């Protein structure tokens, strides 16, 4: 099986699931909500990081996203976003993640008429953080959310033009929101992919099902990943232990 398998886990549940993660050798993708960042006990995070690293596990991080937007037209929103992401990088100093996943914040329904203004703000914003990622030896990865097609993400990636600034492809979001095929998406963004979020749905809601329980063709997906992004990390976004176990079993059919 592909060795770079990670699993989504909220930081609020990391302590209770630490023993399980170590016992089954699952690399965590730790999600920090705004509330989690405000209530971190740094000594506890440091101890948890030591347990993970001593067990030979790698980590990734998923940053908070609700209400945040690095390309917002309102400078106050960008400033709040900046402060939250600075907190994320403080946590990253402990966890030493390979990748930190961020939502770009672009939505064509809201910003379509101001796309270039949003893009300029986002480019300026991320240029502040790329040196932080380089110093930590990790990658900042932009995850597709509401994007109907990949041109805006590609414009952002090309403008930053740095190996520490890449793409996290979320196949579940692609299935819900995009109007282009997997081949078209990978043709545009495949070479930028550092990570792929693995979960299934029926195209109407973000169900976070194990692979094979929705409508996504995972055989096709993994073929494209092997072709375009053979070094990408695979992160299972299952929101319960039971779904994670089903997802791990299902992945054996594809990898």
Image (cartoon, rainbow, N blue to C red):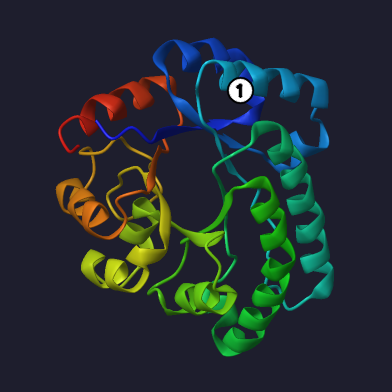
- Residue at 22% x, 58% y is 227
198 vs 214, nearest the viewer: 198
Position of residue 226 measured from the top left corner of the image (x, y, whole percent): 23, 51
Vertical position of residue 103 compared to residue 116: above or below:
above
Q: How many marks?
A: 1
Quadrant of the image occupied by residue 128 = bottom right
Is residue 190 among what the camera can see?
Answer: yes
Quarter of the image with the C terminus is top left
Vertical position of residue 217 compared to residue 237: above or below:
below
Which residue is under mark 1?
13
Position of residue 232 measured from the top left corner of the image (x, y, whole percent): 37, 49
3 relative position to 88: left or right: left
Quadrant of the image occupied by residue 12 = top right
161 vs 220, nearest the viewer: 161
Q: Residues within 10 Å of mark 1 (few under 14, many from 20)?
A: few
147 relative position to 62: left or right: left
Is residue 41 among what the camera can see?
Answer: no
Position of residue 73 measured from the top left corner of the image (x, y, whole percent): 73, 78
- Residue at 37% x, 74% y is 149
Vertical position of residue 125 compared to residue 98: above or below:
below
């Amino acid at each position: 099986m592909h060795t770079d398998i990670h699993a989504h886990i909220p930081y609020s549940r990391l302590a209770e699931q630490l023993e399980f993660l170590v016992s089954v050798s699952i690399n965590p993708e730790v999600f920090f909500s705004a509330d989690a960042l405000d209530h971190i006990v740094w000594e506890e995070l440091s101890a948890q990081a030591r347990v993970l690293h001593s067990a030979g596990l790698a980590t990734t991080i998923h940053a908070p996203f609700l209400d945040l937007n690095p390309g917002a037209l309102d400078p106050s929103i960008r400033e709040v976003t900046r402060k939250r992401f600075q907190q994320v990088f403080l946590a990253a100093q402990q966890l030493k993640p390979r990748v930190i996943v961020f939502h770009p914040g672009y939505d064509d329904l809201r910003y379509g008429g101001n796309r270039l203004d949003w893009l300029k703000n986002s480019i300026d914003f991320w240029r502040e953080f790329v040196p932080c990622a380089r110093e930590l030896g990790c990658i900042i990865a932009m995850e597709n959310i509401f994007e109907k097609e990949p041109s805006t993400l590609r414009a952002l990636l090309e403008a930053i033009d740095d190996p520490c600034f890449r793409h996290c492809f979320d196949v579940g979001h692609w299935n819900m929101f995009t109007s282009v095929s997997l081949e078209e998406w990978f043709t545009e963004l495949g070479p930028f992919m550092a990570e792929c979020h693995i979960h299934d749905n029926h195209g109407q809601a973000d169900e976070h099902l194990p692979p094979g329980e929705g409508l996504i063709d995972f055989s096709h997906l993994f073929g494209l990943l092997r072709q375009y992004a053979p070094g990408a990390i695979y992160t299972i976004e299952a929101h319960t232990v039971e779904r994670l176990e089903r997802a791990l079993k299902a992945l054996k059919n594809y990898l």
